[in-house]
Amino acid sequence: MIQAFVFYLFATAVIASGVMTIASRNPVHSVLWLILAFFNAAGLFLLIGAEFLAFLLVIVYVGAVAVLFLFVVMMLDVDFTTLRSGISRYWPLGFGLAGVLLAELVFAVLAWNAGGLAPATRPESAADGSNIVAVGELLYSRYLLVFEAVGILLLVAMVGAIVLTRRRRSGVRPQNISRQVRRRPADAVRLTSPMTGQGVEL
């Protein structure tokens, strides 16, 4: 009974969060609703016994959404002074959503301990352990080279995204590290002995 209740709870939350992601006019609010949808989708994966996909959805996709939030701020130039004005009136709503997420986590753990919605038969590769162990063994043995290639590809993509969003500001003096290293005290300090009543010539 609790498994079906938690399933419909998470499914309703996923659909509602997806609709709000599209309907929100503020891009920051859309990203926050998308994060909520990912968390609820992770709860659905957890119910069917796919722990690896649930953790992957939270770690990778929510992390990617945080990067998306960063690019929204960098590229759209959102004025946070206007957004933060009157933020105190949203505290009750924020605590309410946090309470709902906490209740969903408790229900997910209870449903998981009760047996979840996983099928009775498990694959042979995961018969002696969880699917996280099975995926890890395949990932770091048979697909090791592919895994490393994907890591390099993501690194190149991250560097390219940083280069594309880097802003060039005029009127800023760049730092010349080699010139600073070559500088000697004689080039920076000048000893003078001014006469009484005379100033120092610059």
Image (cartoon, rainbow, N blue to C red):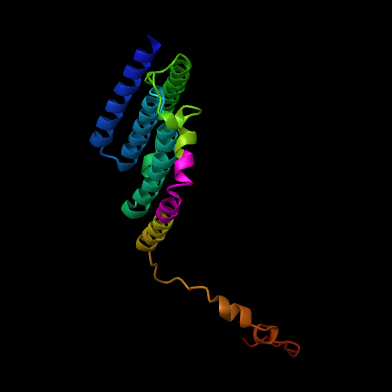
Residue 39 sits above or below residue 160 on the image: above
Q: At which x and y percent is residue 68?
A: 36, 47
Q: Closest to the observer: 186 or 31?
A: 31
Q: Closest to the observer: 149 or 195?
A: 149
Residue 111 sits above or below residue 202 on the image: above
Residue 1 quadrant: top left
Q: At which x and y percent is residue 120?
A: 39, 18
What residue is drawn where x is 45% and y is 54%?
Answer: 148
* Residue 120 located left or right of residue 109: left
Q: Bounds of the magenta span?
A: 136-151
Q: At which x and y percent is residue 87?
A: 41, 34
Q: The C terminus lies in which quarter of the figure?
A: bottom right
What residue is drawn where x is 39% and y is 57%?
Answer: 153
Query: Is residue 143 part of the magenta span, yes or no?
Result: yes
* Residue 176 located left or right of residue 157: right
Query: Is residue 135 part of the magenta span, yes or no?
Result: no
Dominant SS type (magenta): helix
What residue is drawn where x is 36% and y is 51%?
Answer: 71
Residue 61 quadrant: top left
Q: Closest to the observer: 6 or 120?
A: 120
Q: In the current view of this chain or complex, which residue is farthest to the front?
A: 124
Q: At which x and y percent is residue 194?
A: 73, 89
* Residue 91 located left or right of residue 7: right
